[in-house]
Image: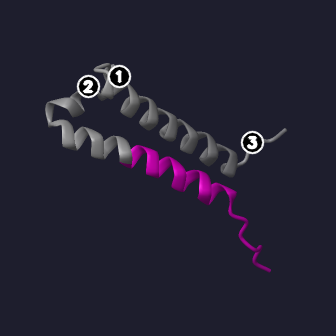
Amino acid sequence: MKITKNDWMTLIGFLLFMIGMLSLILSVIGIHFIFLKFLEYWGALIGVLFKIFLILAGFVLIFLSKLHYPKKS
């Protein structure tokens, strides 16, 4: 089975979505991912906006990977 570009886009989109959702949910109870800890130094609003951006970027990548473009002749 060959992994296509759309499969990679779906995987990356899913990872972005999951990291964004988990970090948003965990930040409510005071737990932060170490690799996203720097966001908390800029303030809570910037951290939440970045996490929402991760979620939306994941959705967009998944959506774009599932589109079927017509082949050019």
For the C terminus, the quadrant is: bottom right
Q: Is residue 20 above or below residue 49?
A: above
Residue 3 is marked as 3
Q: Is residue 34 above or below residue 56?
A: above
Q: Residue furthest bottom?
A: 73
Q: Which residue is mark 2?
A: 37
Provide residue 49's location: percent of width, then percent of height. 29, 46
Query: Which image quadrant is residue 54 in?
Result: top left
Which region is colored magenta?
53-73
Badge 3: residue crowd in 10 Å (few <14, some 14–19, many ≥20): few
Query: 13 and 55: which one is in front?
Result: 55
Q: Residue furthest left?
A: 42
Amino acid on which disc 3 is placed: Ile
- At 85% from the left and 38% from the top, the residue drawn is 1
Query: Which image quadrant is residue 40 in?
Result: top left
* CA distance for labels 3 and 2: 33 Å
> Element under label 2?
loop
Tag 2 and tag 1, C-beta contact below 8 Å: yes
Q: Nearer the viewer, mark 3 or mark 1?
A: 1
Q: Is residue 59 left or right of residue 49?
A: right
Amino acid on which disc 2 is placed: Lys
Residue 33 is marked as 1
- At 22% from the left and 29% from the top, the residue drawn is 38
